[in-house]
Image: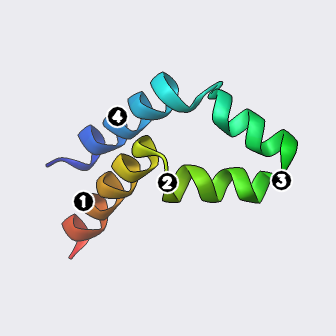
Amino acid sequence: MKRTKVFKEIDELITSYCDGCFLHLHFKKEFSKSYAHKFCIGECTIGQKLQEKGKTLINDQK
């Protein structure tokens, strides 16, 4: 898969789902920015999809 296509898919995921996410804003306000980030990366389904896309980019470099 071309890197530009993967970057475009990542950008679409972030703009569609992550920008203005209620859970991220709530956790950031109630706990901390790092807690919200950890939740998004570790437990959110969109964060998991972003990780998969990132692994694709890393594997393409090898």
Q: Earlier in the sequence, mark 2 or mark 1?
A: 2
Position of residue 44 measured from the top left corner of the image (x, y, whole percent): 48, 46
Name the residue that disc number 4 marks: 8
> Does residue 8 lie above or below 61 as drawn?
above
For residue 56, which numbered disc appears in the image? 1
* Residue neighbourhood size for the residue with mark 1, other residues' Cα within 10 Å, grouped as few (<14), some (14–19), many (≥20): some
Q: Is residue 23 left or right of residue 52?
A: right
Q: How many marks?
A: 4
- The answer to whether the residues at label 2 and label 3 have Cβ atoms under 8 Å apart is no
* Residue neighbourhood size for the residue with mark 2, other residues' Cα within 10 Å, grouped as few (<14), some (14–19), many (≥20): few
Q: Amino acid at mark 3?
A: Ser
Q: Earlier in the sequence, mark 1 or mark 4?
A: 4
**Of labels 2 and 1, the one closer to you:** 2
Element type at mark 3 = loop
For residue 32, which numbered disc appears in the image? 3
Name the residue that disc number 2 marks: 43
Q: Is residue 57 left or right of residue 1?
A: right
Q: Earlier in the sequence, mark 4 or mark 2?
A: 4
Q: Amino acid at mark 1?
A: Thr
Residue found at x 30% / y 56%? 52
Position of residue 49 measured from the top left corner of the image (x, y, whole percent): 34, 47
Q: Gap in Å between the C-alphas at discs 1 and 4? A: 13 Å
Q: Amino acid at mark 2?
A: Glu
* Rendered image quadrant of residue 6: top left
The one nearer the camera, 2 or 21, is 21
Residue found at x 73% / y 57%? 35
Residue found at x 46% / y 23%? 16
Q: Amino acid at mark 4?
A: Lys
The one nearer the camera, 62 or 22, is 22
- The answer to whether the residues at label 1 and label 4 have Cβ atoms under 8 Å apart is no
Element type at mark 1 = helix
Q: Is residue 10 left or right of residue 4?
A: right
